[in-house]
Amino acid sequence: MGNRKKKETYSYYFYYQLKLFQALQALLADDSRFGFIIMDGNGALFGTLQGNSREVITKFSVDLPKKHGRGGQSALRFARLRMEKRHNYVRKVAETAVQCFITDDKVNVTGLILAGLADFKTELHQSDMFDPRLQVKVLKRVDISYGGENGFNQAIELAAETLGDVKFIQEKKLISRYFEEVSRDSGQYCFGIEETLKALEMGAVEILIVWENFDVMRYVLRNAQTQETKTLFLRADQEKEKSHFQDKDSGVELEHVEEMPLLEWFANNYKNFGTTLEIVTDKSQEGSQFVRGFGGVGGILRYKVDLQNLNVDEDAEPIDY
């Protein structure tokens, strides 16, 4: 029986890890949405990238005259015609960009990548026809070897470092804002599991911040004799201690009602508390300090709360880092 229970526990663990990974992918996808405009002499493609998911919004073809070798007046007429068609092409791209990347008069992407062959992308970026709201969102212009979807894939690869930097900067700004609340002792912040959960229950958390490798499990346990339940938060090393899963008075083994990584529980429930969830790394100096100094979980509050004088769950296990 003991081995079977262990196997069931391990299978549950891996199942939850898979669910957690899927939940985090969805959360990261929701976090930052980047727009892409791919231009070449055959047409334009408009797409977005969220997390690991890319989407083609729309695309269209264009028939631009090739360069002409004749001389004389016919060459001048041809050059004017060619310039006019090129101008109209850039105009159409600029108009389509507004349809794709502006919703209700607001830009709906974190940043834009302009990619293309020749000078099309530069013409668009510098054109008066390109909406100024989108112009300021351009993060990078990249040269690609193909148009269409192949060009889209290549543009994503070439812009990967830039997009990563944007996420990195956003993360640094968020945690710096958190540290500012702490340094001012504003009362508009919380840290640690107990404080954060209490603030969530009050609906006071504006932004919930959790480290991506937060390795605490959440257990809901029930005493079969008294039907009383309690919630525990345990690290991997604490899970080995049997006393956590026994009634303190009688020594009776407690039933497992619920068991999942706390990070997954946050991912599943944060919307119920009216907050937004930001998953951060420890790759920046700020992120590393947040993990080491505050345990990797905390929040920015909507208003001042005296959390120290609030009663916390006496059954909750303290987590030390």
Image: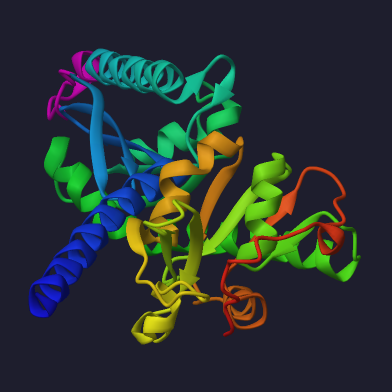
Residue 280 seen anywhere in this rendered image of the structure: no
Q: Magenta stretch: give its range.
A: 62-75
Residue 168 point in image, percent of width and height: 52, 64
Image side of residue 278 versus residue 242, left or right: right
Residue 150 point in image, percent of width and height: 12, 44
Q: If the image is split into quadrants, where does the C terminus sit? A: bottom right
Image side of residue 73 versus residue 100, left or right: left
Q: Quadrant of residue 18?
A: bottom left
Image point 34% across, 85% down: which residue? Answer: 240
Q: Quadrant of residue 255?
A: bottom left
56 or 134: nearer the eye?
Answer: 56
Examine the structure image and report whether residue 118 is included in the region drawn in magenta: no
Image point 46% across, 55% down: which residue? Answer: 226
Type of secondary structure dominating the magenta stretch: loop
Image point 18% across, 44% down: which residue? Answer: 151
Residue 133 point in image, percent of width and height: 59, 29
Please determine whether, in this image, residue 134 is positioned above or below residue 1: above
Q: Quadrant of residue 5?
A: bottom left
Please determine whether, in this image, residue 220 is positioned above or below residue 236: above
